[in-house]
Image (cartoon, grey):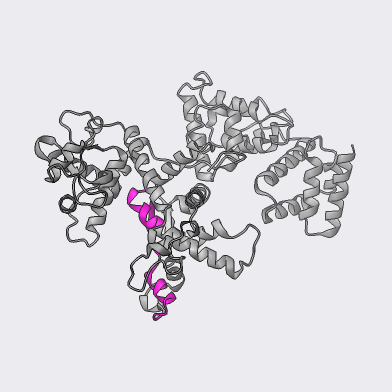
Amino acid sequence: MTGDDRPTLPPVRLPSDAELARDALAAPLLARAVELTRWARAGGPAGAGIPVGAGGELLAEQLKQAAAHLGLSGDEEAPALAADAWNFAVDTGLLAVEEFEETEEAEAAGQGAETVDGPGSDDPVGTAAPEPELGGLTGAPGAAAPAPEEILGLWRSGLETVLADAATPSFEELLDGIEGAVGPDGEIDPNTIDLDALDWNPEEEAEALDSALGNLYLLTATDPAVAAGSMVPLPVLAASMTVPEGMDEPTDEVLEEVSSTMMRLDEQFRMLEPTGLVVHQPVDEALTREDEGEEPYDAAESGADPDEEDVSRYGMVRLTPLGLYGVRERMREAGLDVPAVGDLAHAGADALLAALPVYTEENASSEIQGWFAARDAGGPTGGDGTPAAARELLAAARGGDEAAPVRRLACQQALSFAGPEAEPALREVLEDRQLGGLARVWLAERGAGNVPQPDEEMVFWLTIDTIAAQVATAGEPDELRDLVRDLVDQHTGFFDKAWRVEHPATGDVLETMGRVHPDKRIAKDARKAAFKARSR
């Protein structure tokens, strides 16, 4: 992921660091890693540490003990789960590995002057003991508990290792495409392996996983249902990574690539779920059996709704709040602008109005309320609270530049959260051509008295400004067609008056009205009016 020429992503809502740290400690992989570090503190003679093999890996006997300590003895995957947790503790620095000197190696292995075997042997090459600096997390007497930021940093360092592992195919997968590499007996024939023939590019694999996580992040930021916890079907995620933009009907080749990507993502998310990054529902194994020629899966016999069943059996995934935090931090480190709700609490009104158009309704509500709260508490407005905040918003909404209509629409949205104490600030701009219309709307919605009626010039100016803002933020949806039709029906000679409006967007708005109005005669009148406006 790089930040070059990349737009600002929509903001996301994150829990506090304390909540995220609790989530990190509750994630299975880190929870087990911490528990094994505590076990290592109690194990070994006089705190000498746990004997380990090459790379800090547990020896066979210690691995059994570790699995038993974690309560995994009855699980057939116990050795793998215990090994993953131990390696996570080593990778994060919870455990510090110290290798023997050569003479110590020989004595520890009981081999006299002989040296131990290489990697893969069951002879110790060193010991692992808890890192003193993290003792507050792993049971060191008198040690201070780590701050949430330290816990999150620890979790992120371990996450990077798991992400790297997830992006690396197994040796068997690498050899799968090499004819004769694996014999009928399942043994690997090293003489048939051509390293140049291995179809694997580490950078491409890592980028593909980054792309999947980035798309999940974007879905969480823009889709309220996903943000609320709805799962994303793996085929949808895979298609977002592989189907070319603008392709309405994917070819068989593209569909095959989607299927391959989906299965790869399924494997990767299985590895990532124990970190707490994602919640993952794996692909139904019955699908694989069908591909291998076994009896097809019957959704009706499962008793589930056929439509829901058919989607879910292809796998589902979503980012957890901790995962959203983790992906966002990785994006920040890559140079992307990844705002979070609350970032603008102490920003100026200009920054707030510029950012709001990409917010979901719920996130915009939280951001605006936080912005007002900061000023009520004596923020950059000098402690004058809502009246000063309203004046700041109105001042930032002024302008004749291309983005000004969107700012005024955002200003109207922000002012909807202002209390009655903002009324004096709104009355101050009643005669302002750019702001008088939205001020009247605000006052009228609150039942304020003594609000002067706008003159025709202000009505038409506000109409042009509003349509310009809507087109800039939402394009040309059906609602705009209805609005344009209603405006023309309600105002006799609408275009004869509209083209005279002194607004920078008048020509563009009239052209848009001509494009969306269903009546060809009226659409032609709108285009003529647009030409007049631009010819002034």
- Residue at image location 51% in from the left, 59% down from the top: 238
Q: Nearer the viewer, residue 346 or 333?
A: 333
Q: Residue furthest front?
A: 113
Query: Is the C terminus in the top left, top right, bottom left or bottom right quadrant?
Result: top right
Q: Is residue 152 left or right of residue 85?
A: right
Residue 412: x and y, percent?
61, 37
Q: Is residue 523 left or right of residue 348?
A: right
Q: Nearer the viewer, residue 74 or 460?
A: 74
Residue 239: x and y, percent?
54, 60
Does 178 sit above or below residue 493?
below
Residue stretch in magenta: 268-295
Residue 153, quarter of the rendered image: top left
Residue 231, quarter of the rendered image: bottom left
Q: Is residue 423 visible?
A: no
Residue 132: x and y, percent?
22, 31
Q: Residue furthest left?
A: 45
Residue 457, quarter of the rendered image: top right
Q: Is residue 272 visible?
A: yes
Residue 182: x and y, percent?
38, 68
Q: Nearer the viewer, residue 116 or 375?
A: 116
